[in-house]
Amino acid sequence: MNNINTNHWRQLPFIDVITTVSKNKGIKKTEYKESGKYPVIDQGQKFISAYSDNTELVGESTPKIIFGDHTRVIKFVDFLAVYGNDGVKILKPKEGIEAKFLYYQISNFDIPNTGYNRHFKFLTEKTFQVPKVQIQQKIALILSTVDDAIQKTNQIIQKAENLKVGLMHELLLKGIGHKKFKKTKLGVIPEEWDIFSLQELINSGLITSHLDGNHGELYPKAPEFTNEGIPYISANSLHSSRVDFTGSKFLSEFRAKQFKKGVALDGDVLFAHNATVGPVALLETGYPFIILSTSLTYYRCNISKLSPRYLLNYMQSEKFKNQYQRIMSQTTRNQVPITAQRTLLHVIPPFDEQNKIADILSAVDVDLLKNNAEKDKLINLKNGLMQDIFSQKVQIN
């Protein structure tokens, strides 16, 4: 790829690029099935949303682009499928325009979230940059190759996630090497294990501190945030059992030291309890402390009796999820307040076994972290390539 001669690219309006803007009769969501002969493509984030056996609603197998008028989701489809009928636009390229090339160019558009009652109107007003067909094909091949690598990485990640779910079910149900079991409120567990409410863990000293980021009058105002200092994090910072500080807000150390609650330390287990409920992460940081927003709670373990890595995995298990989901189902608010958290039950093995279970599950987490990082690199590579290609900074030879 070299500096490009822009004369090789034509600027064309929408009507000279798209030959058909159509919508099949479509299928209603009430007709979606978990299995069937034909996949259902709608404007949701999932590529295939459901299935159908309705042969009357099947579109052509020719390549086409699916554009979500409400969602801005863009999909490339080249097989027989049924389409959802709410906001789905089916775009077909004119002769001399490669469908896959067109898909990538539309994907590269910065489609605004606001300012348009229907996002499709924005698309009809765009000018398309179109090189020779052979160049279109090569561009589509390059970007498809990266997409294939992303898909393969996704498959590896999915297998690792499935493996972890299976291991968690086995290890948190049967433990390691047990032969005697007992019935409890949370089901059958090894005889040597115990069950405690969070409040009991606090009373017995296994949890030394448990506080959320409810800051009251100390809640920081927008002008107080800075570009460096002490991180102020929220639920959207919790990814893959870790805290991602990318995009975090910061407070000066002087301002951060004024907080009395929600001051998390290295080794704390963080739980998202408000609005976004469920994500859990182990805080591993070189910062002296971290300030939590109102959406997070920290669990500080007595590390000689309760492994933070074990607690992290237990709080990701179905045993724990089922408990807080029952609490949420009893109210219209999507949250698990700190008082309700203290009623939740925790399965606690002997300390040595906690560490053995954590070691096994942490190995899968390391693999997931590595593959998620690889996926992010590939996505950044693809985005960079699209920017360079469609801004005509590079030439495809």
Image (cartoon, grey):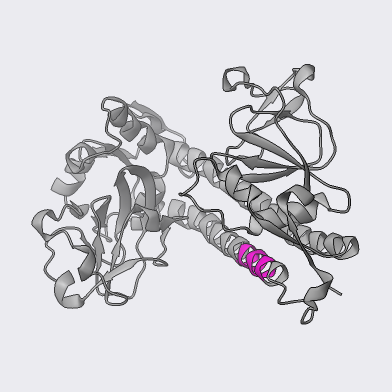
The residue depicted at 46 percent of the width and 37 percent of the height is 174
Residue 218 vs residue 280: left or right? left
The magenta segment:
377-387
Q: Is residue 324 visible?
A: yes
In which quarter of the view is residue 228 placed?
bottom left
Secondary structure of the magenta portion, mostly? helix
The residue depicted at 30 percent of the width and 31 percent of the height is 328
Residue furthest out toward the right: 134
In which quarter of the view is residue 194 placed?
top left
Looking at the rendered image, the quarter that the C terminus falls into is bottom right
The residue depicted at 68 percent of the width and 44 percent of the height is 75
Between residues 339 and 330, which one lies in front from this camera angle? 330
The residue depicted at 81 percent of the width and 74 percent of the height is 7
Residue 382 vertical placement versus 158 (above, below): below
Residue 127 vertical placement versus 52 (above, below): below
Residue 173 vs residue 97: left or right? left
Residue 141 vs residue 309: left or right? right
Give how far across and how far down residue 117 sits, in percent. 49, 41
Residue furthest out toward the bottom: 3
Looking at the rendered image, the quarter that the N terminus falls into is bottom right
Give how far across and how far down residue 262 sits, in percent. 20, 58
Between residues 192 and 81, which one lies in front from this camera angle? 81
Q: Is residue 150 visible?
A: no
Give how far across and how far down residue 104 sits, in percent. 71, 56
Residue 244 vs residue 370: left or right? left
Residue 374 among those drawn in magenta: no
Between residues 388 and 277, which one lies in front from this camera angle? 388
Residue 349 vertical placement versus 318 (above, below): below
Between residues 295 and 210, which one lies in front from this camera angle? 295
